[in-house]
Amino acid sequence: MHQIVFNEISAHEVSAIPTLEQLELISGFKVDEAFLSGEKEDPSFGVVERDGKKIFRYRSKDYRIYFTMEDGAVVVQRVLHADSLKDFLFRSGMGAGSEDQKLGNSRSFWKLIEAGEQARRK
């Protein structure tokens, strides 16, 4: 089992979620080594890639957790509601493809992730 670390932005985003939904979201968020290594597929998890940079995605109902692995810890960069992502993709004029593919091609998405990476950890 990995330690889960939230930065200031992701901690704020998760605290804005109603308490029972927070508990459900976090209780289902178990990062499996087999998924990270590519040995196992899990529809709840995905990978967003661009220019050799990779960020993992966990999907649970209406929320998406975007995280990286650093020194054996799961570092949560952003926690976003699915509706905010749909709105983001619509405003960005993103066409066909999976949600992960669309986000991988979006500079705005990577700026969002970089803001999370630069935020202090809690």
Image (cartoon, rainbow, N blue to C red):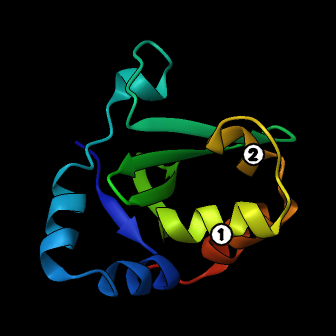
Residue type at mark 1: give it: Asp
Please give the name of the residue rendered at 56% of the width and 71% of the height, measured from the top-left corner: 84
**Along the viewing direction, whichever of 69 and 91 lies nearer the viewer:** 91
x, y percentage for residue 109?
74, 63
Q: Which mark sits nearer the N-terminus, 1 or 2? A: 1
Q: Secondary structure at mark 2?
A: helix
Q: Image quadrant for the C terminus?
A: bottom left
Rendering quarter of residue 42: top left
- Mark 1 against mark 2, which lies toward the viewer? 1
10 Å crowding of disc 2: few (<14), some (14-19), many (20+): some
In the rendered image, the vertical position of residue 59 relative to residue 97, given as above or below: below
Please give the name of the residue rendered at 16% of the width and 55% of the height, measured from the top-left corner: 27
Q: Secondary structure at mark 1?
A: helix
Please give the name of the residue rendered at 16% of the width and 80% of the height, measured from the top-left corner: 19
Q: Image quadrant for the N terminus?
A: top left
In the rendered image, the vertical position of residue 56 relative to residue 34, given as above or below: below
x, y percentage for residue 16?
34, 87
Residue type at mark 2: give it: Lys
Rendering quarter of residue 110: bottom right
In-image side of 103 versus 55 (left or right): right
**Along the viewing direction, whichever of 52 and 3 lies nearer the viewer:** 52
Task: For residue 77, say whether it is visible.
Answer: no
In the rendered image, the vertical position of residue 60 relative to residue 120, given as above or below: above
Please give the name of the residue rendered at 72% of the width and 38% of the height, measured from the top-left corner: 101
- Spatial CA distance of label 1 from label 2 is 13 Å
10 Å crowding of disc 1: few (<14), some (14-19), many (20+): few
| Pointers 1 and 2 in contact (C-beta within 8 Å) | no
Question: Where is mark 2, residue-wise?
Answer: 102
Q: Which mark is residue 87?
A: 1
Rendering quarter of residue 40: top left
